[in-house]
Amino acid sequence: MDPVIIVGAGPVGLTLALALARQEVPSVVLDEGPGKDEPRPARTVVLREDTAALLERLTGAALGEHGVRWAGWRSLRRRHVVSDIAFDPAEPAPLHIAQHVLTGFLRGAIAGEPLVRTVVDSRLDAIEQERYGISARTRGPQGTWWRGSYLVGCDGPRSTVRKLQDIRFPGRTAVERHAVAALRVELPWEGRALLHRMPPWRSSGPSAGEVTARPLPDGAWRLDWLLPPGNDLVTPEVLLTRIRETLEGWSDGPAPAYDLLDTGVHTVHHRLARRWRAGRVFLAGDAAHLLGALGTQGLDEGLRDAENLAWKLAAAWHHGPHEALLDSYQTERRAVVAARLRAADQVLPVLRGGGALRHIVPGAARSQDTLLTDGHLGRGPLGAPGTHAGSPLAPRRPEAEIPVGTPPGAQVTDVRVTAEDGSFVRLRDRLDRGALLVVLIAPGTGVWDRKHWMSAGVMPRLAAAVTALPHPAELLVAESYPGAPAHSVLLVRPDGHLVTALSGVRPADLYAAAEATLGEAAHGEQRREEDKDEAAGDDRTATARAGSGAR
């Protein structure tokens, strides 16, 4: 079967290629550029726990050693501390890393991956879809036609793929603008990120704005100043004045010495593509959506696009068309991003509309800070990872389903499990391999070798049920899981979302849930309709031949 064609070699496209390779699906990455990235210290990304873990699984790199995991988060309003959060060292905190460093690790992993071919200096020019495949034409030194099974546009806000498919991209332009500077300087909040609203050295009103400081490795920081509405030019003099007055304000005296590493202006747009699938063509990342106001991170959502789409494409690539499964990519991911954009649109007038509300509603200033903190830390409606409770892949709730600490459709908690070879691993390490995960909660098993309990209790019956599932699955055992009683069984999707939690071993319920998760019910109905059409066609052909013979 032909490889998957991926247009765009940014973090989302490279992540998708590695995720497909992990599931033994080949791909061709069409890179419009030269195959390397210019170092830009002021262009950074904040990765949440789940997306950082995804990239570490795919690249094998310890990204935390090349970025900074925040020690805490502090919010100020004028001169008052509104909140001061210290992160538990044992819990993963947001990871702040330069984008060119992240992309470098992705490119390095792809260089050693035989299932991924990267073609540089290749600009997409045309797409032609057929029933059993797709073709893409490129310009450039290696311009040619490329044959693929599917094509995914990860080619950014000005996506050529999206334009060639005539997919609308409505939304709002310049929702926010920020002046950005990366500098090496000593600040009084070592390892902690800071949000300072209405700093006292700025005049009151809409131009008072806010400034965010986020630590980087080697004593560097990224500073972002919210700019007032409009398109006023940010000159070097204006930016240097902002740096000086900010450092002086935080130091209560002369500005400390600093080395300016990089500068820029970051403009946030909010847009959402009408469709994320057109036949064998899919959109992901900035080609499908733009968001980023109020501290939210667009790359986070793009990486979740790649993880969601990869296992579904792999299932279709290995086992034949799964239209319901492929359709669910748009249904699930677009709904999550649309909800986040709606939340931002509702909050923006409150947070950016002036200070009247805090004088009317007691505690409103603190509530505003909480909303911003949610966006920056990946919490609440602005920042928390989306769930797929309303997914078309969600099974009918069996009577044996029980509530656990993770609601159906949400990401599972990362716990220690015993793998099939008897080794202890993290549950998250088994994700993105294309297999469903079946997790038995069995307290006390951790002190015994697997060979002693594989043939005891409910294990033989559960192992037989897992073997009989309609898709490859891996049986894991955990001593505990938040909210899950002993002998409960969890079914987890390849991308880490909980399908259901069952009370005990229920082979029929487990099979039905797995079938629904793969869209198999709809797939079976589709195949039956195709068989009917084919049979009808054969009947028409036979009738025509009979009529021809009679004449």
Image (cartoon, rainbow, N blue to C red):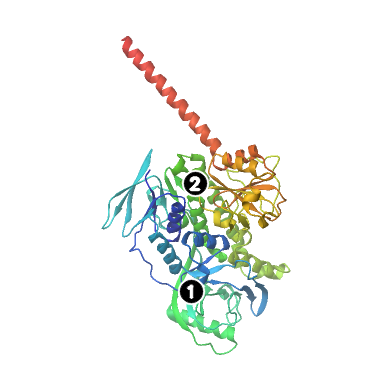
Which quadrant would the N terminus be assigned to in this image? top left
**Which numbered tag is attached to residue 259?**
none
Q: Nearer the viewer, residue 451 or 458?
A: 451
Can you say whether 268 is above or below 453 in the image?
below
Q: Nearer the viewer, residue 124 or 231?
A: 124
Q: In terms of sequence position, does the residue under pointer 1 or pointer 2 come before the other?
A: 1
Which quadrant would the C terminus be assigned to in this image? top left
Give the residue furthest to the front: 452
User: Would residue 292 be seen by someone viewing this image from the given angle?
Assistant: yes
Indicate the quadrant where residue 465 lies: top right
The residue beneath circle 1 is 180
User: What percent of the width, then of the height, locates residue 476?
Assistant: 61, 51
Helix, strand or loop for disc 1: strand
Whether residue 485 sits left or right of residue 325 in the image: it is right
- Kindly report the distance in space between the C-alpha atoms of the residues bearing marks 1 and 2: 38 Å
Can you say whether 38 is above or below 246 in the image?
above
User: What percent of the width, then of the height, locates residue 456?
Assistant: 67, 45
Neighbourhood count class around disc 1 (C-alpha, 10 Å): few under 14, some 14–19, many 20 upward: many
**Which numbered tag is attached to residue 312?**
2
Task: Identify which amino acid the numbered label 1 is placed on.
Answer: Val
